[in-house]
C-alpha cells in the first residue's frame, strides 16, 4: 500500500483532508474536505457542479495534506489519482460523512437540486512527518 | 486586498497553512506549513534544498488552504503567486515562527548546514466558507 503503516491511523481519524487539484490553467487549487478511507482508497463527496469535479475530470492527479488532529506536528501527504466518480445514491455517502464528523445520521446542508457524487482516490505515494 | 475582511482573522491566528504547489510534471503537491501574514503577503520558511522551493521557482502559482483553529467549519483558500524568495538572515524568520507557534524564541530543529529562505506569497484571490 502507498500509505506507510505507521501513518494509517491518521486516515482513520476525523482529520480534515486538504485536497489539492489542478485548475483549468494548470494552477493549484486547495480546500479542506471530509473523507472516508476504506483501507485502500480515499473517498470524498462532491456536488456535480463543483469546479473541483471538473478539475479531476481534466487531470485526475491530486494531493491530500492531512494533519493528525491529536498532534499538529504529525502529518501525511498522500499523492494519488482519481480513479472513479460515482453517483451518491440516496446521499448515503454524504450521510455517512455527517455521521463520522458530526455524529449526525443525515447531512444537514443538503440543498434541493444538489446531486452528489463520490470521488474515489487511489493513493500512489505518501510522505509523512512526525 | 485579495483577502476578504471577514476572514483576515484566520491569517492572524496560529492556523496551519496547507500549501499546494505544482510539481515537475504538473502534478499537485501539498503539505502543512507555518506562516506569517504581514497584512499583505503570506510568508513561509523553507530550506534551500526542498522540492517545494524548486516547484515555486518553476511555477510561482500556489494555493493555501487554512482552517480556523477555533472553528473547523470556517476556512479560507488563498490563491496567489510567489513574488520573492530571500535569505533568512540569522534565521530570524524561522525563529519568529517558532515564537508564534511554539512560544519558543529559537527554532529547535535547525540542522547544521540548513540554509533557510523566506518565501513571500502575494494573494490574488480567495474563497472562504463559514
Image (tube, coloured by chain):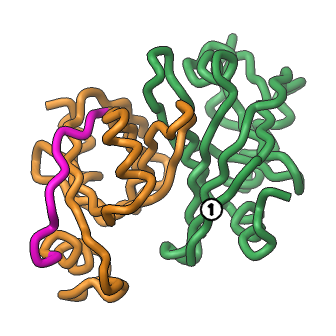
Chain colours: A green, B orange
**Hey, which quadrant is residue B118 in on the image?**
bottom left
Left or right placement of residue B80 versus residue A130 in this view: left
Q: Is residue A28 visible in this depiction of the protein?
A: yes
Q: Residue at x 85, y 21 (%)?
A: A87
| Image position of A117 with respect to B93: above or below | above
**Closest to the observer, B98 or B109:** B109
Q: Find out whether residue B86 is within the magenta segment.
A: yes
Q: Percent from the top left, x then y, of residue B94?
A: 23, 73
Q: Residue at x 27, y 34 (%)?
A: B81
**Hey, which quadrant is residue A21 in on the image?**
top right
What kind of element bears circle 1? strand
| Image position of A86 with respect to B68: above or below | above
**Closest to the observer, B107 or B115:** B115
Q: Chain of mark 1?
A: A
State the predominant SS element of the stretch in magenta: strand
Q: Find out whether residue A121 is within the magenta segment.
A: no
Quadrant of the rendering where the N terminus of chain A is positioned: bottom right
Left or right placement of residue A56 versus residue B88 in this view: right
Q: Residue at x 32, y 31 (%)?
A: B126
Magenta residues span B80-91
Left or right placement of residue B100 versus residue B15 in this view: left
Q: Is residue B67 visible in this depiction of the protein?
A: no
Q: Residue at x 72, y 70 (%)?
A: A7
| Image position of A111 with respect to A67: above or below | above
Q: Which residue is mark 1?
A: A127
Left or right placement of residue B88 versus residue B115 in this view: left
Amino acid at each position: 500500500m502507498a500509505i506507510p503503516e505507521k501513518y494509517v491511523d491518521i486516515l482513520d481519524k476525523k482529520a480534515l483532508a486538504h485536497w489539492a487539484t489542478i485548475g483549468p490553467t494548470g494552477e493549484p487549487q486547495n480546500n479542506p474536505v471530509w473523507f472516508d478511507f476504506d483501507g485502500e482508497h480515499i473517498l470524498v463527496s462532491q456536488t456535480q457542479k463543483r469546479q473541483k469535479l471538473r478539475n479531476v475530470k481534466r487531470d485526475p492527479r491530486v494531493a491530500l495534506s492531512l494533519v493528525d488532529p491529536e498532534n499538529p506536528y504529525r502529518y501525511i501527504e498522500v499523492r494519488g489519482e482519481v480513479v472513479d466518480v460515482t453517483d451518491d445514491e440516496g446521499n448515503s455517502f454524504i450521510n455517512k460523512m455527517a455521521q463520522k464528523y458530526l455524529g449526525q445520521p443525515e447531512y444537514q446542508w443538503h440543498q434541493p437540486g444538489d446531486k452528489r457524487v463520490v470521488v474515489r482516490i487511489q493513493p500512489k505515494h505518501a510522505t509523512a512527518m512526525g
